[in-house]
Each structure stands twice: as C-alpha cells, then as structure tokens.
Image (cartoon, helix red, strand yellow):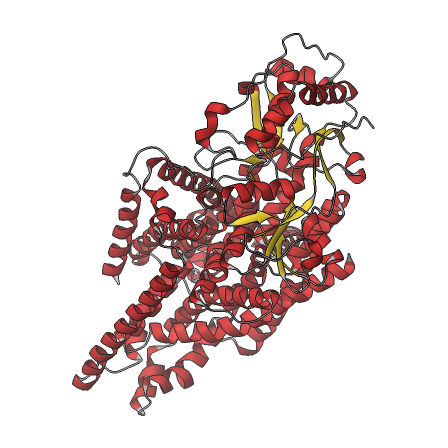
Amino acid sequence: MSAPTQVLFDAPGPRARRNNVIMSVVSVLVLLGIIAFIVWKFYDAGQLEPNRWSPFTYTGIQQVLLRGMGATLSVAAVATLLALAVGLVFALLRLAPTRAISLPSTIVLEVFRGVPVLLLIFATFMIFGNRIGPFWSVVIGLTLYNGMVIAEIIRAGILAVPKGQREAAMAIGLRSSQTMGLVLLPQALRAMMPTLIAQVVVLLKDSALGFMVTYQDLLYQVNAIGRQYNNLLPTFIVGALLYIAINMIVAASAQWLERRLQSKTAGGSGPANAID
Amino acid sequence: MKKLHTLLAASAAGILALSACGQSGTPETGGGGGEGGGDTAAEAPQYEVASDVDLADSPTWSAANDAGTLKVGVKFDQPGLGNKDATADAPEGFDIEIAKITAAALGFEPDQIEWVETVSANREPFLQQGNVDLVVATYTINDERKEVVDFAGPYYVAGQDLLVAEDSEIAGPDDLAGTTVCSVDGSTPAQRIQDEYGDAELVTYDAYSKCVEDLQTGNVDAVTTDDAILRGYAAQYEGEFKVVGEPFSDEPYGIGLPKDDQALRDAVNDALEQAGEDGTWTEAFEYTLGDSSGVEQPAVDRY
Amino acid sequence: MTQLFLSGTWGTLRLFLLTLVGCLVLGTILAAMRVSPTPVLRVTAHTYVNVVRNTPLTLVMFFCVFGLPYLDIRFAESAGLNSMILATIALIAYTACFVAETLRSGIATVPVGQAEAARAIGLTFGQTLSTVVLPQAVRTVIPPLGSVIIAMLKNTSIASAFNNRELMSAMRNAIELRGDLVITILLATAVVYLVLALILGRVFDLLEKKLVILR
C-alpha cells in the first residue's frame, strides 16, 4: 500500500520540508493546548482528585480488572474458535454447486448478519440463558454474527484465488473436495489472514456487550468498580486503556502475520475489510 | 510504521506490567458506614438456622436439601438492597439479609446459599426453569407475575421516590414539571414518569449508577426509582444527595417462588412473620438501609 | 405497542441518517490525512484510527455522553436532543475509522499510473486525490463500504443505553409491558433490523452494479 500513496505527491522540497516542520510544531502546540484544556476542565470538576484514582493502586482492584480481562479474553477465544468453524462451514455451503444447499445457507447467513450483535446476545440470554448461562449466551451471540461475517471473508478469499489454480488442480486429477481443501482454501486463508484477525478484534470489542447479560467481563467489572468508588469516569478511562492494549496486541500480531505471509500468497487480498 | 507498532506494543505491555504492582488489599469505599460496606462486617446480624426442617411436600425444598445448597436469585447492582462490590465475594444488602433469614428458617447455613445474579428481565424464566429456588431481587408483586410465579411476603413496601441534590427545591412528584428526571431504560418507574408526569423530561440509561453520575454533574435534576434503591445511593453520597420521601406508588417486594409449591410458600411466609416477631427484620433493615424509624414490616399476604 | 415500535424505528433511522453523512465526511478526511504529504497529518490520523478503532463502541459512547459535558460541550437545551447529538458524534467518531480504512485500501488499488499521470499534468495533491484517485477508489470499495454502513446501522442499537429512544429501547419497553410476549417482541425487533439491513444491502448492490470497477 505504500507505493501508491507515495505516488500521490512529490518528494518534499526545502520549502515543503520547512513548512512541514512549522506545521508539526503548530499542531503539537494545538494538541498540547487541547490536552491542557481537558485536564484543566476535569481537574475543575474534581475528576482528577486522588481519591477517584487511588483505588487503581491497590492490588485488590487490579486483580478484579485482571479477572475481568481474563473473562473477556476467554469468552472471545471460545467465540473466535467457534466463529471460525461456523464461518468455514458456511463459506463452503454457500459455494456448494447445488442451489438446494447454497440458497438456505445464504438465507441463514443474511439473517444473522442483518441483526445487531447486542440483540443476538440478548435474545440468546432471554430464551436459553437460564439453561446455558451468561458465558454461552455471549459466545453464541458473538459466534452467530461473527461466524457469518467470517464466512463471507473466507468466501471472498476463495473467489479471489486466481482461476488457474483451480484449473491446474482439476487438470492433475484432484477431486473437487481435494481442490478446495488442498489448493484453494490454504491460499484463501493466507490471503485473508489480516482481515480475519481484524474481525477477531471486532469480536473482542463486541464481547464488551456481555456485561448486559450479567457476564462478568472487563466492562462489567469496570461498571462495578465505578459504582463502588463513585469514580465512573476514571474507571472507564482505565477500562478503555486496557481494551485498547489488548486489541492493539491482537492487531499488531495481524501486521506481523501479514508481513510473514505476504510473499507466500498467490491471490491478492483485495479491498476486503473487517466490519463492525 | 513498524516503529510505531513496536512502541504501541511496548506501551501496552507497560500497562499490563503496571497493573501487577501496587498497594496490597482493597481500598475503602467512598460511602458512609452503615450501608453494608465491607468494613461493617463486625455488626452483621446472625440468624439462627433451624435444624429440624422437613418440607417433604415441597419439591423445590427437597431438591435443594438433597443438593445441600439453596440457589437464590438476587440483584448485584442495587446498593443497599442487593449489591456486589467489585472486590467482594458475596453480595450485600437488605434483599440479601431477607434471603439469609429465609434460608435459615428453611435449614440452610449462609454458606449453603448460592447467589445467582438476575436482571429484571430474567426473574420469571429463572424460577420457571428451576435455575433458582427463590428470587429476592426488588421483585414487585403484581397480578401478571402471579400468573407465572408465586410470591411470599411482601417483606417490604417500596414506593417510587426521587433522589435529588441536598439543596434541591423538588419536594415531590408534583414539582417535576420542567425538570429532567433520570431512570433506567424500559423500567416501570421510567414508564410511570412518561405516562403520568409528562411535563418532566425523562432521561434513561442502562444503569442507575449512570443516572447518579448525571445527577452529580447537574445534567439531570432528579433520579427516580423505588425508594429503597435510592436510600442506598443517598447513604453512599451522604450530604450530597437526599431522598425526597414522598413515595408516589406502592411496590410491595415479594419473594418469588416456583409456581404451585404451596408448602414452600407457607414456610417462607412463616419465616417472614417470625422475623417480624423476634426483631430480626428490623435488625436486617438497620444493618443495610439505616434508620428504621417510621418504617414498618408489611403484613404477609397469603393470597 | 405498534406506536412504540414505529417511533423506535424512526429513532433508529434518524441516528443512522445523521451518522451516515457524518461518517462519510469524517472518514474521507481521515483517509486523505493518512495519505497526505504532511507527516503530522499522517501520524494524527493513524493514531486516531488505531485508538478509536480498538475501543469498544460502548466505551466511545460513554466518553462522549459523560466526558464531553465536563468540557462544557452541550448542544441543546433538551436532554433528549442533546443525548441524540452526543450518541451521533460517538457513532460518527467510531464508524469514520472503518470508512477511512476501507477508503485507504481502495486508494491502494488505484493503479499507480493514474496518480503519476495526474501529477504529470500538474495537479496538486488535493486535486490528484479528489478528482482522480478518490473517485476511482470509492468505486472499488463499494461492497466493503456497504458492509461498514450496514454494521453502523446495527451499531445504533448501542445508543439505547445512553438515553436514545430507538428500536432496542422500544424492545426493552415492550418487554417490560408484556413480559408474556418476550419471544414475539425479540423476533419483531430482529425483523425490523433485518428489513432495514436488507434494504440497505439492495441499495449498495445497485450502486455496485452501476459504479463498481473490478481490478
């Protein structure tokens, strides 16, 4: 992606470089000004008083936050595995040559993709929650939605593998299941890996909706701490930092994987994106 | 670009590392005493556990007795009634004490109670499907609910009230015209404001703690829900907020039981009457909600 | 009950339409910043996108609704209108990241020769981007952009927790009123969302057929 963006403008000359430096300084000053304004306003409103922040220096509270993070990660991990499995199955079903198979699976896919995750989690909890508990309500809600999105990602990946690959596979006498399993799918998954991981980040963020169905994830604990110490805003800031940290680690691993896999793919990944 | 990502990953790791050190233990809560903070545990009332209970006629009791645990559905986010601090192992509040009293009369030690968090929407399904044996969760007795579950009690009659700033001029629901009032989305108190006090502007969030935050910043003029819940917040924010004290509805709180378990319902009603006679009801009230003067235990309704 | 759902649907649509305009504008600006010649703009946009994109929408909305008032930012006298504007800002701030990323991946698919030719005839960066590269980029990314916009429609449901009367809020009210009809109410809500999403999907299909360039 860096190639075309560099083509959009000339290499900066001496004047442009000077302007860049001036602009940098000005914008850093503006940014500092904004930050100072925010800090001052928060200080004025008493949000920076030590007693609102001191709870976070205690190990008891940190353990609660870590426990919340653990719950968030475990629900996201299970949902990711299930969503990948569901996604793979539905991608293959939609690509099936028989309309009797591809049409119903398309309908199911459109239904679960068209409904908010919040509603899916809530409905699962209301209908089955008393038997399966909040953990599985969240997992099922997340799996239904993200599984369908992942199915579309994988399908797009399979379709993006150059035609010659399939033809070559057929030519050497592979059956269609072998063509799919040995030739198309491995290339498609590789090409789609960054998008898939981006979708995992989406899933991780959506798991924050679990607190609405009494699943004790990070956001649930953030709410509980904020209620206990009357410091809703500081606690949410800490919670946001933790979420950003987790997601950036996952996103960074996506970048790393992308670089590692770039040389080995035949099919381009194209303009596919994770959606949330 | 690569550098930036290394930097981000490093700072993320830094945040995690930071959270691994600090003062040990848990800080004290900001609220005043007497509303069930962790440090008042010394005065916690004890209830005598009955030893010779035999409710063979009650399927619910028999199953719980065989399992050795009584599953009670309670709220975890209502200070004063059923509230679990982030750092606590068990919930605290008036509902919790009532549940302990009931459990004791049914022959269960406090450590034999399993607390199950319920939200308003899943109390009936939980009882119907046998997920819990009892529900003590700010559960208002009404006819629609009686269709699907049974109620013992009431053990308390709450009323919709208003939480306002200490210096507020709002003295009752009739002063609400032109003000902003906060409650929880979809709740009965919110619907009542909309239907009967339309001159007030209604603000709704998903939790009362957010309403209280808005009351602090002056974004709303009052928070409304059952007075018992508001008392919990008033105790937590002593000197800042007060409960107006002009309830404008009757919300008899009952103990939800599985439908058609008459033996259990009689036993729980007996337990509540007993608690009124021997003073444990008052003890539980004062331990959790504060001063009990002017508050009376309602008569049990064996409908 | 019908009344409740009708006004809820209107609430959802209102949030959606306002956010649609806002996130396309802000998303385009962010995408342009990310490919601009000025390093500061690139870094700013990159940081913004990475921070906001990695924060759950519930938290973004929390900061808009409970943080902005501390900065004396208030948009309307009426609390209801104010909450709607704050929720819209949160939705725009969040969705714009995804729009920007989608547009950027589209910019990457525009052949290098296009930009080179534009510069060769003397167009500035702004002209190259707005008259040559972006129009082509938008056309290639219509399908993924459609997914982002449909996802945003569903994300409006999160505004229900922050004083917005929309479909999800209508559903909660309906459940509280008629506890015996829970499953019907859940289904009805799902159907309304589904219909809205399908209509939107059709619109993007048509757009795709008319405009899309496959490379």
Farthest residue, direction top? B52
Residue at (52, 53) in percent of width and height: A151
Q: Position of residue A82 (x, y in %)?
A: 50, 42
Labels in figure, total: 0
Q: Is B185 placed left or right of A265 in the picture?
A: right
Farthest residue, direction bottom? C121
Q: Is A237 placed left or right of C148 in the picture?
A: left
Q: Could you say which is closer to the camera, residue A24 or residue A160?
A: A24
Residue at (69, 49) in percent of width and height: B189
Vertical order, B202 against A34 (above or below): above
Q: Is residue A275 visible?
A: no
Q: Quadrant of residue B146?
A: top right
Q: Position of residue C25 (x, y in %)?
A: 47, 76
Q: Position of residue C155 (x, y in %)?
A: 55, 59
Q: Quadrant of residue A195?
A: bottom left
Q: Quadrant of the N terminus of chain A?
A: bottom left
Q: Position of residue A16 (x, y in %)?
A: 21, 83
Q: Is B5 placed left or right of A77 in the picture?
A: left
Residue at (35, 53) in percent of width and height: A248
